[in-house]
Image (cartoon, rainbow, N blue to C red):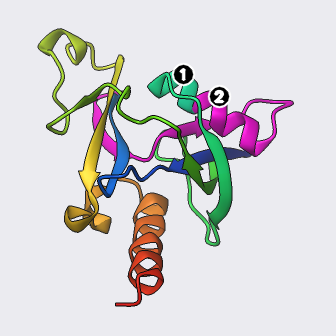
């Protein structure tokens, strides 16, 4: 049975002009995406995103303005019967220095990726001047990053 899979993601930019991303190993695939994930039944989008940041980054965030919601058909990369709806928000944190982040993408220990059915993840900061849609793996995230870069360019008057 086909289902809608609602996902919520956060755009967190620190005071050093870096974007927080999540590098993940899922079912044998290496994926870079924004922090966030699946919405749970009975949960609002903002509450779900705040929960995801606490789970993934041990970081309390304030969910800010809505940024983007998927406006095209996208089938799930992991279940070819589910349609993905992704909702992106700007998020703000009082203190980002507590985030445990790696320097390199997919800097996993061999045992973390030994089981092809397993999962592993870590966070990483990407400087905005190095960010492009190619940084992301999944199609909706690529669109969101293109929009973000355009937004940042226009908001800084360049």
Q: Quadrant of the N terminus?
A: top right
Residue occupying image coordinates x 45% and y 27%: 57
Q: Is residue 1 visible?
A: no
Q: Which residues are magenta?
A: 27-52
Res. 67 image quadrant: bottom right
Task: Give the side of residue 93 with respect to residue 62, left or right.
Answer: left
Given residues 148 and 23, the one toward you in this image is: 148
> Label for residue 51?
2
Along the line of sight, which residue is nearer the eye, 2 or 38? 38
Identify the residue shown where x is 49% and y is 21%.
58
Q: In the displayed structure, does residue 48 sit left or right of residue 74?
A: right
Q: Is residue 78 left or right of 83 when viewed as pictured?
A: left
117 lies above or below 8: above
**Residue that protrudes farthest toward the right in the picture:** 42
Q: Position of residue 24 (x, y in %)?
A: 33, 33
Position of residue 52 relative to residue 33, above or below, is above
**Whole-number angstrom distance, CA of label 1 to CA of label 2:** 6 Å
Q: Pointers 1 and 2 in contact (CB under 8 A)?
A: yes
Residue position marked by numbered label 1 in the rendering: 55
- Identified at 61% across, 71% down, the residue is 72
Task: Tell me, yes or no, whether the highlighted magenta stretch contains residue 43.
Answer: yes
Q: Quadrant of the C terminus?
A: bottom left
Name the foreground residue: 82 vs 64.
64
Q: Position of residue 96 (x, y in %)?
A: 41, 36
Is any part of residue 48 visible from this angle?
A: yes
Image quadrant where residue 122 sits: top left
Element carrying mark 2: helix
From the viewer's perspective, is residue 126 above or below residue 118?
Answer: below
Position of 42 relative to 143 (above/below): above
Residue ID at (81%, 30%): 41
């Amino acid at each position: 049975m086909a289902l809608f899979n609602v996902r919520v993601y956060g755009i967190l930019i620190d005071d050093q002009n870096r974007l927080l991303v999540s590098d993940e190993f899922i079912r044998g695939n290496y994926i870079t995406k924004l922090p966030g994930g699946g919405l749970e039944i009975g949960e609002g989008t903002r509450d779900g995103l705040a929960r995801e940041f606490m789970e993934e980054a041990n970081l309390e965030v304030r969910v800010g303005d809505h940024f983007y919601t998927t406006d095209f058909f996208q089938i799930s990369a992991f279940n070819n019967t589910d349609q993905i709806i992704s909702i992106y928000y700007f998020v703000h944190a009082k203190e980002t220095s507590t985030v445990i982040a790696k320097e390199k993408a997919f800097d996993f220990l061999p045992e973390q990726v030994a089981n092809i059915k397993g999962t592993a993840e870590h966070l990483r900061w990407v400087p905005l001047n190095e960010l492009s849609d190619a940084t992301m793996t999944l199609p909706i995230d690529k669109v969101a990053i293109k929009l973000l870069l355009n937004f940042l360019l226009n908001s800084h008057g360049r």
